[in-house]
Amino acid sequence: MEKLVKALQLAHPDITFVPGTHASWSPQQRQITYSADEQETSTWSLLHELGHALLEHKTYASDTGLVRMEADAWERAVELAALYQVTLDAEHIQDCLDTYRDWLHKRSTCPSCGHHGLEQSKGLYRCLNCQGHWQVSSARFCRPYRLKMRQNA
């Protein structure tokens, strides 16, 4: 891991790499936090976060936009892995993306009828079946609460 981090620092001097407990990208600080352990998954996560950085991901306007950003960052991680001679497991990528797909599935499920809806604006969904409305939390890493909205009379 140390050798890879040094190579990435040389190639991307505008990005700060900091060891930590989990991998993340901070666009405000232009900083990647990575787990310094020697597990393959930590290396893959580091490349994924660098993918976010190189794609200049800052924020997302919709839930599907977040899923798209995650997929794009993994695509870039695959390119980086080839460049730095790292073997990146495709099943691991799909497992990671599944967490976001599952999150989106839960958020887009109508609390009234169980069918799926479309996000009308950030965090506000409308059911395609019963025309119900619900709002979801802006939090990405918590249980997806759905609050039904009253229909205008």
Image: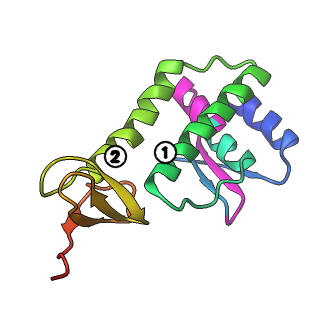
Quadrant in which the C terminus appears: bottom left
Callout 2: 10 Å neighbours few (<14), some, many (20+)? some
Measured in 3D between alpha carbons, the distance from the residue under mark 1 to the one under mark 2, in whole angstroms, is 9 Å
Task: Report the amino acid beneath label 2.
Answer: Trp
Measured as percent of width and height from the top left, residue 43 is found at 61, 30
Question: In the figure, is residue 106 to the left or right of 119?
Answer: left
Bounds of the magenta segment:
28-47
Callout 1: 10 Å neighbours few (<14), some, many (20+)? some
Question: In the figure, is residue 91 to the left or right of 130?
Answer: right
Quadrant in which the N terminus appears: top right
Q: Residue at left 41%, top 42%?
A: 100
Measured as percent of width and height from the top left, residue 115 is found at 20, 47
Task: Report the amino acid beneath label 1.
Answer: Val
Q: Residue at left 67%, top 60%?
A: 27
Dot 1: what SS? Answer: helix
Give the residue at mark 2. 103
Q: Residue 67's mark?
A: 1
Q: Residue 27's mark?
A: none
As displayed, is residue 86 above or below residue 41? above
Measured as percent of width and height from the top left, residue 3 is found at 76, 29
In primary-sequence order, the first of circles 1 and 2 is 1
